[in-house]
Amino acid sequence: MPAIVKRLTAEALVDVDYAAASLDEAAEFEPRQGVYTVSNTTQRTRTLLLDAHLNRLEDSARREGFALHYDRARLKQALCRMIEASGYDNARFRISAPGDRPSEMLLSIEPYHPPASAVIQRGVTCITSAEIARLNPASKDSEWMHIRKQLAADRPSDTYETFIVDARDHILEGLSSNFFAIENGELRTAGAGILAGISRQIVMQICAPVISLRLAAPLRARIPHFSEAFLTSSSRGIIPVVEIDGIAISGGSVGDYTLQLRAAYESWVAEHLEEL
């Protein structure tokens, strides 16, 4: 099924003048100046923390030097109508706000497919790069959406994600995810210089009964000492990482802490879904 893209103006929800097979393809038609957020629905029109996504969208716009002018309830209604009319069981959606038209929103949807069970059971292989830097990491800006798409296309086909490493060798975040490592019995993730991911915030809320949290970016040089690692994103939840830069983590298998945190995460999500 192709993606569906519409523009929400002050007057109406209207068709755009282009067609795209996916959200990635639709992104090519979006301006580089702007902000965006991505999430998905469950049970057709139920979402998780959409207001948190929209709060971050507005904060990102302020960081990019413009203010958004839109009706939040009307946007949710428009998104709901698009999903109901699409025939999709569940939808992955992107809400984009062009910097030169802050009174309009681009709403893009495609069928949502959760991560394959093999990805959760076996974990994924990732790499790091010190050649990538985000100018404004706290902002989910459209320029980064275009840049990371090309960076993702350039990495090896068997690599799931690229983690950004700063000048001090700290692993900050992925191109489209946040990063967590377990070392010396602590769960560690960067506390600054990253995008405050919605799924990251959930993990930080639910982790206490499982493992203690330390806001400190893991060091790349310490990868051989990680007992476990995982990444998070809104559309994927927790994805176990079993290899980074060719170095096996947890013996190349998914660790117990990661499994416990994923179970706690899924339970939290089930309790906090809301209708659009």
Image: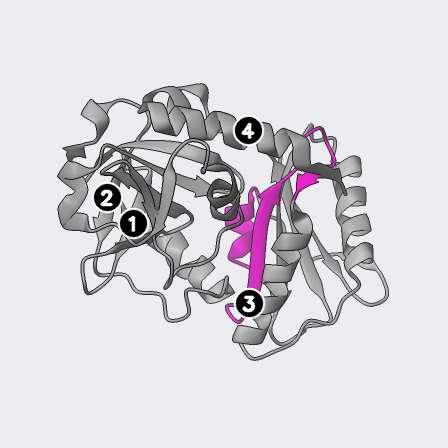
In this figure, which residue is indicated by the disc labeled 3? 60
On the question of residue 17 being in view, the answer is no
Q: Is residue 43 left or right of residue 128?
A: right
Q: Nearer the viewer, mark 2 or mark 4?
A: 4
Relative to 260, say whether 11 is above or below.
below
The location of residue 95, given as percent across then percent down, is 64, 55
Q: In which quarter of the image is residue 260?
A: top left
User: How busy is the neighbourhood of tag 3: few (under 14 within 10 Å), some, or many (20 plus)?
Assistant: many
Helix, strand, or loop for circle 4?
A: helix
Q: In this view, does 136 lie to the left or right of 47?
A: left
On the question of residue 75 being in view, the answer is yes
The location of residue 149, given as percent across then percent down, is 40, 53
Mark 2 in CB contact with mark 1 (< 8 angstroms)? yes
Q: Residue at x 49, y 36 (%)?
A: 236
Q: In this view, does 22 lie to the left or right of 45?
A: left
Q: Which residue is drawn at 22% across and 54% down?
A: 129
Q: Nearer the viewer, mark 3 or mark 4?
A: 4
In this figure, which residue is indicated by the disc labeled 1? 163
In depth, the one of 218 and 211 nearer the eye is 211
Q: What distance separates the C-alpha of mark 2 from that of mark 3?
A: 27 Å
In this figure, which residue is indicated by the disc labeled 4? 266
Disc 3 marks which amino acid?
Ser
Q: Residue at x 70, y 57 (%)?
A: 16
- Report the span colored magenta: 21-48
Q: What distance separates the C-alpha of mark 2 from that of mark 4?
A: 26 Å
Mark 3 in CB contact with mark 4 (< 8 angstroms)? no
